[in-house]
Amino acid sequence: MPRYKLTIEYDGGPYYGWQRQDDFMSVQQALEEAVEQFARHPVTLFAAGRTDTGVHASGQVAHVDLEKEWKPEKVQEASNGLLTLAGHPVSVLSAEKVPEDFDARFSATKRHYRYIIVNRRAPLTVDVNRAWHVKHPLDVDVMHEAAQELVGHHDFTTFRSTDCQAKSPMRTMDEISVTRTDGSRIEIACVSRAFLHNQVRSIVGSLRLVGDGKWSKTDLAAARDALDRKACGPVAPACGLYLERVEY
């Protein structure tokens, strides 16, 4: 069966995450229903990352097997037309035919997540449900310095959900950067081959404590070494998180 790689963008706000649910709409279900309408047979999409409820994507990747060979541009255009018709804020940015051994999840070598904070007193308008609004000033330089304590191979038990199903809490964080891209916008970029459930949002919530002076770099390292979920700062809201890009 021909296999296609889809690169996908979506607003995660209306969905209960990527993964298909029994009682609630998911991104996977929305996209599978669109593909099934033009392919005229049941399909299952496999994604690079199962984003949580409310998490967005600007570069999610999934693969799907179709019974018939289609031109990639037809797969893209037909999917987008049906998604738009159904009112889903989901877009297939590109489609390409790939070898049968390509796997959107297991072939990935790096995943890039970006978290957006709008750091100002004024309420959000265009960024409502697309960024975390933090009113009190944050020290970005201190946050970036502290974040380097989490780069490398560590046990991230403190920074993963108690519902995380990963067999091991060990992960290698290739990169974390904290930058203020303009007067009020702060972006936290995290790069790793694989992430634990709620890992990025847990890290961002703890870095916020560093940024407003409640924690030091030493406190963040101590939380890391505690290997205890209770040592984590408050988890950042889902609305600021984006699966930005997947490398293969």
Image (cartoon, grey):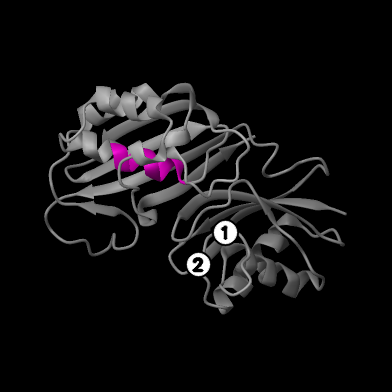
222 sits left or right of 28 in the view:
left
206 sits left or right of 9 in the view:
left
Q: Which element is circle 1 on?
A: loop
Q: Which residue is mark 1?
A: 18
Please identify the quarter of the rendering in which residue 28 is found. Answer: bottom right
Q: How many C-alpha atoms fall within 10 Å of the one at disc 1: few (<14), some, or many (≥20)?
A: many
Q: Residue at x 30, y 33 (%)?
A: 178
Estimate the spatial distance between the alpha carbons at disc 1 and disc 2, rounded to whole Å: 8 Å
Q: How many C-alpha atoms fall within 10 Å of the one at disc 2: few (<14), some, or many (≥20)?
A: many
Q: Position of residue 248 (x, y in %)?
A: 65, 34
Q: Which element is circle 2 on?
A: loop
Q: Amino acid at mark 2?
A: Tyr
Q: Which is more toward the observer, 97 or 112?
A: 112
Q: Which is more toward the observer, 29 or 181?
A: 29
Q: How many marks?
A: 2
Q: Are marks 1 and 2 in contact (CB under 8 Å)?
A: yes
Start-end of magenta stretch: 198-206
Q: Which residue is mark 2?
A: 15
Q: Amino acid at mark 1?
A: Trp
